[in-house]
Amino acid sequence: MTRKDNNPIVSLLSRIVSPFIMLFALYVIFHGHYSPGGGFQGGTMLAAAVLLIRLAAGREISQLQFKKSWGTPVGSVGVFIYFFTGFLALLMGGNYLDYSFLPLGLEAPVTRGWGILSIEIGVGLAVMGILVAIYDDLLEGEPND
Amino acid sequence: MHWQLEIVFFIVLITTAFIALDVKNLLVAVVTLSVFSFISALLYIVMGAVDVGFTEAVVGGGVSGILFIVLIFKTSRRSSD
C-alpha cells in the first residue's frame, strides 16, 4: 500500500483467492433466508474481496476490478432496491415491506421468499458499495498507491 | 454443552486481549485484535448464535482489520523521548 515494489506471492495469491471469496459471498446472500448469513454478511464479504485486491495490487490495477467512482452509486442502487421493494408492497395495498402483496402472481409464501431475496440483494449491494467507498475515501490524498 | 471448548476459547480470548493492550507495535496489536474477534466469533458459534458469530468473523476479522491497517499507515508515531 505504501511501498511500490510488488510481491509476486501476495499478488498471485490474492488474485486466486478473491473470486472464491466473492463466490462464497454470493452463496451467503442467496441462501440468506434459510441459513445463517444474509445481506449484511454477504455484502461485507464482497467488500472484503474487493479490498483484498486493493491492498495487494495497488490503486491503479485494482481500478480494473472495481472503479473508485462506483462505490457510492452501487450503495445507492442497493438502498433503492430495498426501498422500492417495500414501497411496491405499500402501493399494492399492504403495509410497508409486507412481501405477500408484491405483484408477482405467485402464492403468498413463495412471494414472501422472493421479496426477502430482493431485500437481501439490496442490503448486500448497499453494504459492499459503502464499505469500499469508506476505504477509498480514507486513502483519498495518497499520491502513489 | 461444550464447556471444555469454551474454557479454552475464553483463555485464548483474554490472552489476546491483554497482548493487544500491552504490545508496543500497532500492527501486531491490530493482528491480535483480529484474532480476538475471531475467537469471540468461535465462542458465539459454540454458544449457538451462528448468525452473530458469522457477522463477527466477517466484520471483525476482515473489514475492520483492513481499515485499522490503513489508518496505521496514514498516521505516524512521533515520540520524542
Image: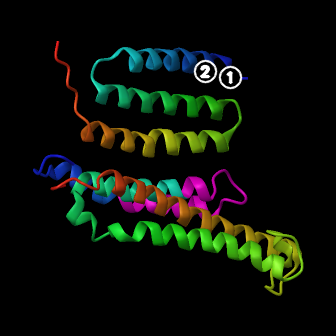
**Numbered tag placed on residue A51 in the rendering:** none
Whether residue A40 is in magenta: the answer is yes
Instruction: Give the image location of residue A138, x and y in percent.
Output: 34, 51
Question: Which residue is at the far front?
Answer: B80
**Residue B5 position (above or below residue A88):** above
Q: Residue at x 38, y 44 (%)?
A: B67
Instruction: Give the image location of residue B61, x and y in percent.
Output: 46, 39
Report the magenta residues as a range. Answer: A17-42
**Residue B56 position (above or below residue A137):** above
> How many numbered tags mark residues here?
2
Structural crowding at the residue carrying mark 1, measured as other residues with C-alpha within 10 Å and reported as few (<14), some (14–19) or many (≥20)? few
**Numbered tag placed on residue B2 in the rendering:** 1
Q: Residue at x 34, y 53 (%)?
A: A52
- Comparing A89 with B1, the one in front is A89
Give the left or right position of residue A19, taking residue A23 as reference.
Answer: left
| Residue A21 sits in quarter | bottom left
Q: Is label 1 in contact with label 2 (beta carbons under 8 Å)?
A: yes
| Residue A87 sits in quarter | bottom right
User: Spatial distance from mark 1 to mark 2, Cα to Cα?
Assistant: 5 Å
User: Is the image coloured rainbow, by chain, by secondary structure, or in one colour?
Assistant: rainbow
Give the left or right position of residue A74, taking residue A62 as reference.
Answer: right
Structural crowding at the residue carrying mark 2, measured as other residues with C-alpha within 10 Å and reported as few (<14), some (14–19) or many (≥20)? few
Kindly identify which residue carries mark 2: B5
Q: In which quadrant will I find the N terminus of chain B?
A: top right
Instruction: State whether the magenta stretch is mostly helix, strand or loop.
Output: helix
Whether residue B17 is in magenta: the answer is no
Is any part of residue A114 visible from this angle? no
Name the amino acid type tagged 2: Leu
Name the amino acid type tagged 1: His
Q: Chain of mark 1?
A: B
SS at circle 2: helix
Is any part of residue A57 visible from this angle? yes
